[in-house]
């Protein structure tokens, strides 16, 4: 998952909402399973009690014996299904199994008290000879328990049945069955509830995704309002914002105001610095010329020559620093950008450097495209960018080298390329040369180390990209500025 997606508000809302929902779904699934077991127990315990009633109805007195006439067909009916086994016992008060499964454990009360602990039975001879029907109802509530029998869990119901005018005053009936159907019903209930909850969670996730998208739409409107602004527009944002982002709008407006004040201060500083630095340097240069005319000593003339060279370097650096300050994105924010024809600007700047190229005995060439190369930018900045690239190529080229200024158009995108056959730039330095005051190690020629830094700032303000490669035949340097399409 991308870093950008992890920073998404939608992502965090989905996580913070879906994780609790899934946790609740798991908890409710477990709870529904146990509730399903309780429901299945209640339902099947009633059926087990009905099965015991059926066993009671089949108890008959045959002379001095009690029998349970439960044929296989009736036993099959008592099973209700083919997933569970059914067991039953008819137990006398003294703990003897009269009929049913002999191996089924006796009720805890009989096990505890042992045979003969119950009330003595009444013999059939003491009765009046009649055989009254066994009562259909009994006066004791049945008891239920779950035990292990033959390696399986079974549910056992125990009840006491009064038998007046019979061999015994009461009988103990046990009916039992395995729990397969009960567990299956509980599982079906749990799965049904879980699937329903998953469907609700999926629908909820979709609703969250759509709802969050609609909720964040005002932020997208603010983004469009900011992007639609001109580069120098620092007026307050005026959008119909919801209450939740009023503080954000206020913070942006405060930032715009602060930025406008900072730019104004920087403009005043640049203007004052230009006056305060250029004037003294011009005065010193004038005095050097005056001293050169007044003093004819050769040693003094040599010192004056070095002083004038140092003053020229300092003047050049001051000019570059001022240009760099004016080229920074913050300072460019108030400059008007417009649709310009790049080849026209490049042609004029190239022509202005022809005399310097001739003095340095360089071959200078300009190639214009067959179609207009439009860019969206500020003319003074573009002129400064092209001029710095040409001056850099002239400075680091030797007599006889070639400098080519070429404008091309590819897919509506304007490209400016300055190629020379000079000393070139090492691959490991091609990123560093755009740093301020950094100078390459391939030459010892004097320079300020600010020319390409100015190019970088101007290109950034025009949203252009810079590529540095070797020149033709891997000699020299080729710097290509790619400007965005001018719509």
Image (spheres, helix red, strand yellow):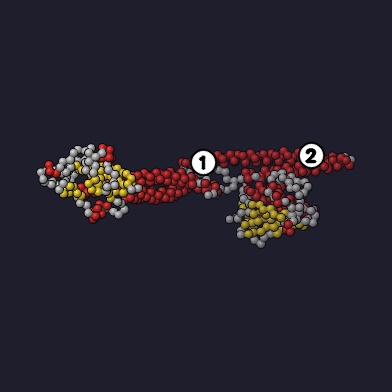
Crowding around mark 1 (Cα neighbors within 10 Å: few <14, some 14 to 19, many 20+) is few
* 128, 401: nearer the viewer: 128
The image shows residue 487, relative to residue 53, as above or below, that is: below
* 243, 289: nearer the viewer: 243
Q: Name the residue: 24% across, 55% down.
A: 72
* 276, 50: nearer the viewer: 50
Q: Which residue is mark 2?
A: 284
Give residue 358's quadrant in the image. Answer: bottom right
Give how far across and how far down residue 466 sits, in percent: 66, 52
Give how far across and how far down residue 14 sits, in percent: 46, 46
Q: Secondary structure at mark 1?
A: helix
The image shows residue 108, relative to residue 82, as above or below, that is: above
Residue 248: which disc? 1
Give how far across and how far down residue 225 sits, in percent: 52, 47
Q: CA distance from mark 2 to mark 1?
A: 53 Å
Front: mark 2 or 1: 1
Crowding around mark 2 (Cα neighbors within 10 Å: few <14, some 14 to 19, many 20+) is some
Q: Is residue 299 visible?
A: yes
Side of 125 relative to 113 (left or right):
left
Side of 80 relative to 241 (left or right):
left
Q: Secondary structure at mark 2?
A: helix
Q: Is residue 44 visible?
A: no
Give how far across and how far down residue 2 sits, in percent: 54, 49
Q: Name the residue: 73% across, 57% down.
A: 474
Q: Earlier in the sequence, mark 2 or mark 1?
A: 1
């Amino acid at each position: 998952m991308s870093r950008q997606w992890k920073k998404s508000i939608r992502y965090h809302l989905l996580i913070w909402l879906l994780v609790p929902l899934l946790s609740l779904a798991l908890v409710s699934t477990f709870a529904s399973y146990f509730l399903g077991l309780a429901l299945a127990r209640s339902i099947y315990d009633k059926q087990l009690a009905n099965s015991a009633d059926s066993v009671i109805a089949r108890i008959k007195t045959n002379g001095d014996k009690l029998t349970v006439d439960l044929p296989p067909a009736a036993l099959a009916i008592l099973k209700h299904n083919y997933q569970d086994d059914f067991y039953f016992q008819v137990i006398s008060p003294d703990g003897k199994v009269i009929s049913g499964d002999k191996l089924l454990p006796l009720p805890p009360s009989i096990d505890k008290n042992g045979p003969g602990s119950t009330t003595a039975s009444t013999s059939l001879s003491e009765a009046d000879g009649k055989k009254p029907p066994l009562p259909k109802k009994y006066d004791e509530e049945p008891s239920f328990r779950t035990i292990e029998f033959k390696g399986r869990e079974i549910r056992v119901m125990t009840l006491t049945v009064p038998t007046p005018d019979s061999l015994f005053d009461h009988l103990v009936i046990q009916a039992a069955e395995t729990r397969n159907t009960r567990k299956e019903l509980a599982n079906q209930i749990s799965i049904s509830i879980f699937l329903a909850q998953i469907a609700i969670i999926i629908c909820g996730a979709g609703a969250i995704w759509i709802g969050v998208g609609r909720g964040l739409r005002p932020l997208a409107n603010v983004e469009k309002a900011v992007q639609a602004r001109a580069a120098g527009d620092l007026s307050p944002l005026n959008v119909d914002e919801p209450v939740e982002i009023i503080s954000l709008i206020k913070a942006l407006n405060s930032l715009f105001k602060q930025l406008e004040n900072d730019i104004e201060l920087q403009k005043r500083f640049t203007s004052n610095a230009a006056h305060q630095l250029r004037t003294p340097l011009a005065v010193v240069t004038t005095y050097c010329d005056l001293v050169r005319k007044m003093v004819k000593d050769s040693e003094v003339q040599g010192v004056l020559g070095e002083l004038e060279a140092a003053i020229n370097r300092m003047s050049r650096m001051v000019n570059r620093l001022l240009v760099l300050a004016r080229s920074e994105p913050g300072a460019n924010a108030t400059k008007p950008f417009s649709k310009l024809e790049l080849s026209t600007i490049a042609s004029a700047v190239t022509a202005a450097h022809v005399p310097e190229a001739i003095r340095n005995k360089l071959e200078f060439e300009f190639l214009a495209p067959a179609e207009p190369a439009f860019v969206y930018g500020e003319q003074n900045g573009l002129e400064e960018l092209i001029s710095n690239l040409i001056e850099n190529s002239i400075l680091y080229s030797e007599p006889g080298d070639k400098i080519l200024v070429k404008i091309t158009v590819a897919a509506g995108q304007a490209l400016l390329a300055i190629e020379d056959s000079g000393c070139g730039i090492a691959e490991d330095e091609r990123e560093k040369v755009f740093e301020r005051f950094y100078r390459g190690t391939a030459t010892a020629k004097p320079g300020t180390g600010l020319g390409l830094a100015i190019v970088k700032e101007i290109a950034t303000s025009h949203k252009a990209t810079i590529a540095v490669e070797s020149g033709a035949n891997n000699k020299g340097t080729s710097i290509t500025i790619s400007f965005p399409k001018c719509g």
